[in-house]
Amino acid sequence: MSKKPFFSNLKCRECGRLYEKEAIHICEFDFGPLEAAYDYEAIRAVLTRELIESRPQTMWRYRELLPIDGEPTVGTQVGFTPLVKAARLAKALGIREIWIKNDSVNYPTLSFKDRVVSVALSRARELGFEVVACASTGNLANSVAANAANAGLKSYVLIPSNLEQGKVLGSLVYGTNVIAIKGPYDQVNRLCSEIAGKYGWGFVNVNLRPYYAEGSKTMGFEIAEQLGWKLPRHTVVCMASGSLLTKIHKAYKEFIDLDIVPKSDFTIHGAQASGCSPISTAFKAGSEMVKPVQNPDTIAKSLAIGTPADGYYAIRSMRETGGSCEDCSDEEIVEGIKLLAETTGIFAETAGGVTVACARKLIESGKIPRDESAVLCITGHGLKTQEAIIGKVGEPRVIGASLREFEALVADEVASKA
Amino acid sequence: MPIVRIPTPLRKLTNNLEEVTVSGATLGVVLDELNATYPGLSERIIDENGVIRRFVNIFVNDEDVRFLQEKETPIQEADVVSIVPAIAGG
């Protein structure tokens, strides 16, 4: 590995002021978010498709474009999830081609958050933190707990007290400290912001946010590589804070700028749940002012962030690429989960149902033309949000261990379909 | 007097104080008073048009002032005003 510092600074997205690569996340002058800045000329000199292809199939095959100094030490096996061609889903949605980027099988905690945590905790170690923490709607908590356990770091995860049981157990099992806060995620966020300032812990989405957020780019890099080193015409991404959408946009642009992929038109669309759709509401109103949602109310709890920190930038990404934004009801989310499962064999959590339901609307409204191709980003596994579909996907039919009873059941089924 | 909680990135301006007490009948007056004691502080929070910056969240007790009356939000003696940077998703 080259010794050149590819990752050079942190930089304010608003005013461009440069900062040292410390555990800081906002500009002192305008509160703008700090983002990782790179020496792209140095990267261009070394990074080629061949080099990437020669490396193990993990997200770290793009390490020159990730903000750590040394080798990754946490989450070294994360990423390179399948990109699945979904012909039956495409037919159901009435479009020429659909691909599923399936982060529901990301390692080790079955959501895209393993990408961001891998970067954040690798950087946390470089910066000397012994305690790591996060504010989470569930998936991030699971990933921080698991990856910290493997790395031998002490962890605290703070969550809203109304999360799905799978997400709560999926943190507790790793022996982390789970703190449930009465109130919505935005209250958890506010508390964590104050704790991070006071305790000197590495909060992955507070003071380590510039490092954390960059991990999401790898989903975009992988999509481009797995499509045969080209960008998808359309990408549909679900949004909570909006960070993932902006980072997939950044990933596509970086690959174009570095001549890793040929320049081509690409469009990124956002998806939200109607019960918490501050970004979609602003986008549809033609505004960049994202008005917070005070009391989110949706089964897509992982997307229930009323004050989306990257909403403004997500809107700009969608506008810049000619994209659109949609939102969907709880019933549509469940239909989306079922449709994806029945046509692809992929069991997505509620956020995935949002992506599928909104993709359907974008196709029906012509925002995604039927003769084009789209990638849907599925970000988490359905076993984590079972409550959303219990009683809505049928029940097993119970019989005795008797061939006669089985034959009667099959005969009934044939009769009922006749 | 009302308490204002200062986020880490602004503590260089408040001699590293985490909390300061400031009087004022509305949030706008409290921020003006704060700026009189700690010059330069309000321009970090309020933009050139007098609006709370996009990436700043201000809470009076537990309520985001965007759901109250923004800078016109009345402030009581026992209130706690928190200035909180926006943070990423989870």
Image: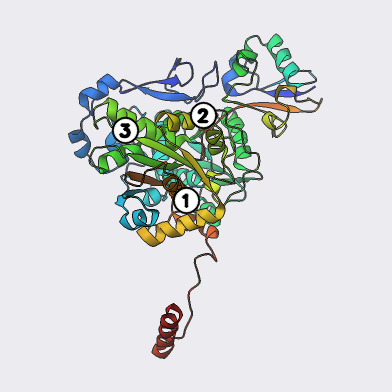
Q: Which chain is indicated by disc 3?
A: A
Mark 2 or 3: in front is: 3
Q: Which chain is indicated by disc 1?
A: A
Q: How far apart are marks 2 and 3 (CA)?
A: 22 Å
Nearest the viewer among B33 and B37 is B33
Q: How far apart are marks 1 and 2 (CA)?
A: 23 Å
Q: Do labels 1 and 2 share a chain?
A: yes
Q: Which of marks 3 and 1 is nearer the N terminus?
A: 3
Describe the element under mark 1 as helix, strand or loop: helix
Determine whether label 3 and label 1 are within 8 Å by CB.
Answer: no
Q: Mark 2 points at which residue?
A: A312
Nearest the viewer among A379 and A328 is A328
Residue A38 versus residue A262 in the image, above or below: above
Q: Which of marks 1 and 2 is nearer the N terminus?
A: 2
Marker disc for residue A357: 1
Percent x, y of residue A190? 62, 34
Describe the element under mark 2 as helix, strand or loop: helix
Describe the element under mark 3 as helix, strand or loop: loop
Q: Mark 3 points at which residue?
A: A265
Given the image, on which type of amino acid does mark 2 rest?
Answer: Tyr
Percent x, y of residue B56? 60, 25
Percent x, y of residue A230? 26, 37
Given the image, on which type of amino acid does mark 1 rest?
Answer: Ala
